[in-house]
Image: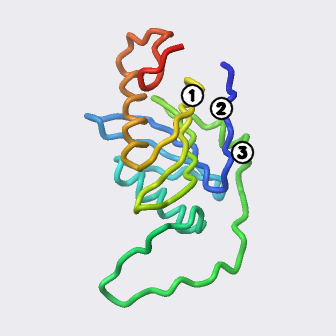
Amino acid sequence: MNKTQWYIGTPAGVVLCIDGSNEGDLSGKFYHSYTERAVPFAGVGQMVLRMEMLYDYLRFPYPGTNTRTFGEEKKLTRLTEERKKKMSDDALLSKHGDIGTFIVRVQHRQNSSWQGRITWMEQDKTIQFRSVWEMIKLIESAVDMVSEQDNRPEELWFGEQK
């Protein structure tokens, strides 16, 4: 395998490991540099919420819109400590899911969504996404290709041709 697209490239880079797909709802875990433990998720909604919590914790990428509250407003405290990496990029890239593995690099959080790049590690292909929904659809299409078992080697992600 060529592995030319295998890199983290951002402080908020995540290795997303898909272990199961039950009627289209994905489950698995993801890894990031700031803990050695996996962050499990059961369903796409939980995956997105836990990744969003990571980005809020890191304050990167900074959200383009603020969260609305109708109760007492919580004031954001200043970031007084720098986040320390606990896992190297090589250790992150060694993690793999049972069905598929993706490197997610969220570069912006604008218009109440995410924009960035996603790499399907098994195919060494990278595609940009413009929203969380588009990212989820890319992951689901890759998982569907794997589950069909009659994959032809020339068939690639999202209808690309060699």
Judge left or right: residue 127 versus residue 35: left
Q: Mark 1 points at which residue?
A: 125
State which tag comes first along the sequence, 2 or 1.
2
Marks 3 and 1 in Cβ contact (< 8 Å)? no
Disc 3 versus disc 2: nearer the observer: 2
Image mark for residue 5: 2
Marks 2 and 1 in Cβ contact (< 8 Å)? yes
Looking at the rendered structure, the kind of residue marked 3 is Asp
Q: Name the residue under label 3.
A: 89
Residue under the point 45% across and 86% down: 74
Judge left or right: residue 89 versus residue 19: right
Q: Quadrant of the C terminus?
A: top right
CA–CA distance in space, label 3 to label 2: 13 Å
Viewer-proximal residue, 67 or 102? 67
CA–CA distance in space, label 2 to label 1: 7 Å
Looking at the rendered structure, the kind of residue marked 2 is Gln
